[in-house]
Amino acid sequence: MTTMMSISDMYVRFETPFGLLEAVRGVNLEIPAGASVGIVGESGSGKTVMSRAAMGLLSGSNVRREGKVVFNGRELTAMSKEEVRNQFGTGMAMIFQDPMTALNPVRRVGTQISESLRVRLGMDKKQAMQRSAELLSLVRIPDPEAMLRKFPYQLSGGMRQRVMIAIAISCNPELLFADEPTTALDVTVQAQILQLLSDLRRDLKMSMVLVTHDLGVVANHTDFVAVMYAGEIVEQASTTELFANMKMPYTRALLESIPNIEMKSGARLKVIEGRLPNPVDRPKGCGFVTRCTYAQQKCHDEHPPLVDAGNGHLYRCWYPLGHTIARKQ
Ligand code: SF4
């Protein structure tokens, strides 16, 4: 399997008045060509910062980034800002959480889709509008010609996200990053958008990175999963292996915190008690230690390394699930 993107030894730090905030710590990750990779974790786990840093989208005088990102055989981290910008559209594309803020409210849908076709692919106005209508049809919007003339405020959340997806795929990107693409949508529309993304990835032969807090989403729509906690990858495997042989107490806690169809009516969802560690003052041991029901003294004293369990299944835990030490009540 060839690699579309590889991320090596990535660190991202922000200078703040309270000290150096370490948001991403030593991440290594490969995105295989044609595959879908889920990056999962709670809010504040570093998944969005890591994805944006990988795409060269983090800027600001207080940002410190280290590590190497290679995209399609070329080192992104060695490119100028302009060279990285040129990768967008045809190389990489991103779908953001909130389509209302990503779309320009005072420009018609057709203008917004056709713009990138004209700039990046050199189409004239008529060709770009024709292609925009085709793209709207590809993202399953009924009556695409009428949609071209609408403004974003006239659309439902689901329709706006479909328009964003049409813009993202307009220049045939090889790698699509989708950052919580269904957060603002109701459950039925979420399922439709996720299925649409999976179908487009397969049909257009793209690679995809799906950033989400929801382990249920990655179960159905990814080939590989990386679970992030406190800026680090704490578990990584093929999706099938992860769900068959979960090692990390944190991954299990994430799984237990999502609703499932077998829950009795009125049953309460489990929550992961406690908070992520302070990113400017991390504990010396495992970052999950104050929230983990399996924690032992060693977890307080020593930071667990990433261990290979075989089959490409990596985890970062002194006492993985299945270990003989009993869970605390
Ligand atoms: S290293 Fe210890 S505290 Fe951390 S997840 Fe494993 S058992 Fe829990």
Image: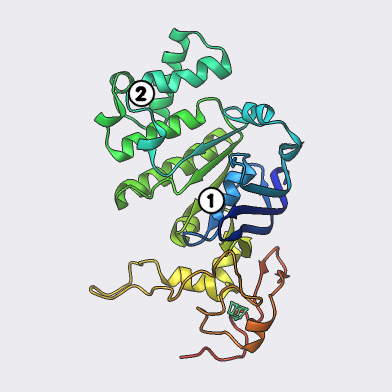
Q: Which residue lies furthest to the front in this view?
A: 17
Q: Report the amino acid beneath label 2.
A: Val
Decide if residue 83 is on the left or right side of residue 145.
right
Measuring from the top left, give residue 17's x and y in whole percent: 56, 56
Label 1 secondary element? helix
Give the vertical position of 136 relative to 227 (above or below): above
Q: Report the amino acid beneath label 1.
A: Thr
Taking depth in this image into account, of 207 and 58 the one nearest to the observer is: 58
Find residue 109 and report its image quarter. Answer: top left
- Residue 109 disc label: 2
Give the vertical position of 259 relative to 56 (above or below): below
Taking depth in this image into account, of 57 and 133 the one nearest to the observer is: 57
- Residue 164 disc label: none
* Residue at the image position 29 percent from the left and 50 percent from the top: 186
Q: Name the residue under label 1.
A: 48
Q: How far apart are marks 2 and 1 (CA)?
A: 27 Å
Measuring from the top left, give residue 150's x and y in whole percent: 28, 22
* Crowd class of label 2 (few under 14; some 14 to 19; many from 20; radius 10 Å): many
* Residue at the image position 72 percent from the left and 69 percent from the top: 310
* Residue at disc 2, CB closer than 8 Å to ligand 1: no
Measuring from the top left, give residue 51's x and y in whole percent: 58, 47
* Residue at the image position 39 percent from the left and 73 percent from the top: 271
Taking depth in this image into account, of 164 and 44 the one nearest to the observer is: 44
Give the vertical position of 115 relative to 39 (above or below): above
Find residue 285 and report its image quarter. Answer: bottom right
